[in-house]
């Protein structure tokens, strides 16, 4: 069963349509993709903080805080004094893992409600929460790519946001960290778009609907979030 679950986890990335069809009938446990996602994030961050030039990283982070917020010199000095490689590692890892868990929990709730309204399906919240870990498998590929980036770095001077080498900011926009659009541009990632594609394919399979409405369901939350984010940037800048 474990080997089959690993094969299914890989199959979601290589042949998603057939894999989601199998998941619909065979009901494999989502423990394996859940473990792979969490382990890949944790391993990548452990490797990153073990190899990054932390003095440079801390200096860069403090400079960004000073420019992007209204933090005074005394507060910056206090942050500088208390920020260590260990504290930065565990706070970053906790934020990444808890954030991933909460995001999947919210997406499962959204899919559960939407699917019942659209197709009156028989799946419950637990089914959609399990579904969320299968379509999260691109996170594993993303973490592996980030680890390779650190591995081949010569000086260890890679910012945390630089780990996401497939984001549209790196590939297209190229705005710097002081730009109001930096956070939004850095959040638009090809691996994230891959996950949205998997959601659409999975919905098509599980609900028996056409790809177009499945894609609309998959993209809707992101469109609202990023659209609202863009409007806020435009309004306040």
Image: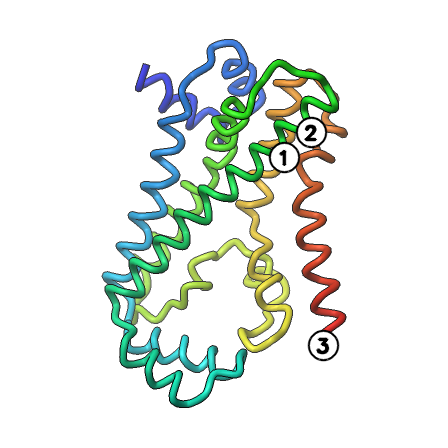
Q: Which residue is mark 2?
A: 114
Q: Nearer the viewer, residue 5 or 170?
A: 5
Mark 1 and mark 2 in contact? Answer it, CB < 8 Å.
Answer: yes
Please tell me whether mark 2 or mark 3 is closer to you in this view: 2
**Mark 1 → mark 3, Cα distance in angstroms:** 32 Å
How far across and how far down the image is residue 42, in percent?
Answer: 31, 48
Quarter of the figure with the C terminus: bottom right
Q: Dot 1 lies on which element?
A: helix
How far across and how far down the image is residue 96, in percent?
Answer: 41, 52
Is residue 193 depicted above or below 146 in this figure? Answer: above
How far across and how far down the image is residue 192, in percent?
Answer: 56, 45
In this picture, residue 107 sits left or right of residue 32: right
Q: Residue at x 64, y 25 (%)?
A: 203
Q: Which residue is mark 1?
A: 110
Q: Residue at x 40, y 79 (%)?
A: 62
Q: Residue at x 71, y 48 (%)?
A: 223
Q: Nearer the viewer, residue 13 or 70?
A: 70
Q: How many marks?
A: 3
Is residue 130 depicted above or below 144 in this figure? Answer: above
Q: Which residue is mark 3?
A: 237
Q: Dot 2 lies on which element?
A: helix
Q: Residues within 10 Å of mark 3 (few under 14, many from 20)?
A: few
**Mark 2 → mark 3, Cα distance in angstroms:** 35 Å
In this picture, residue 127 sits left or right of residue 50: right
Mark 2 and mark 3 in contact? Answer it, CB < 8 Å.
Answer: no
Q: Quadrant of residue 198?
A: top right
Q: Residues within 10 Å of mark 1 (few under 14, many from 20)?
A: some
């Amino acid at each position: 069963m474990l080997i089959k679950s690993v094969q299914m986890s890989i199959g979601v990335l290589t042949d998603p349509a057939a894999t989601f069809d199998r998941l619909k009938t065979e009901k494999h446990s989502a423990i394996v993709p859940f473990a792979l996602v969490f382990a890949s994030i944790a391993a990548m961050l452990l490797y990153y903080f073990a190899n990054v030039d932390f003095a440079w990283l801390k200096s860069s982070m403090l400079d960004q805080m000073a420019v992007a917020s209204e933090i005074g010199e005394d507060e910056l000095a206090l942050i500088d004094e208390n920020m260590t490689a260990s504290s930065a590692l565990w706070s970053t890892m906790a934020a990444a893992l808890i954030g991933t868990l909460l995001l999947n929990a919210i997406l499962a709730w959204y899919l559960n409600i939407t699917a019942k309204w659209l197709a009156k399906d028989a799946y419950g919240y637990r089914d959609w929460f399990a579904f969320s870990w299968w379509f999260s498998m691109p996170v594993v590929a993303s973490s592996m790519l980030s680890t390779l980036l650190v591995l081949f770095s010569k000086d260890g001077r890679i910012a945390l946001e630089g780990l996401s080498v497939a984001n549209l900011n790196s590939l297209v926009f190229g705005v710097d960290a002081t730009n109001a659009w930096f956070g939004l541009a850095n959040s638009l990632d090809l691996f994230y778009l891959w996950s949205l594609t998997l959601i659409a394919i999975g919905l098509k399979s599980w609900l028996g609907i056409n790809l177009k409405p499945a894609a609309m369901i998959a993209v809707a939350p992101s469109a609202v979030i990023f659209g609202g984010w863009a409007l806020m940037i435009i309004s306040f800048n």
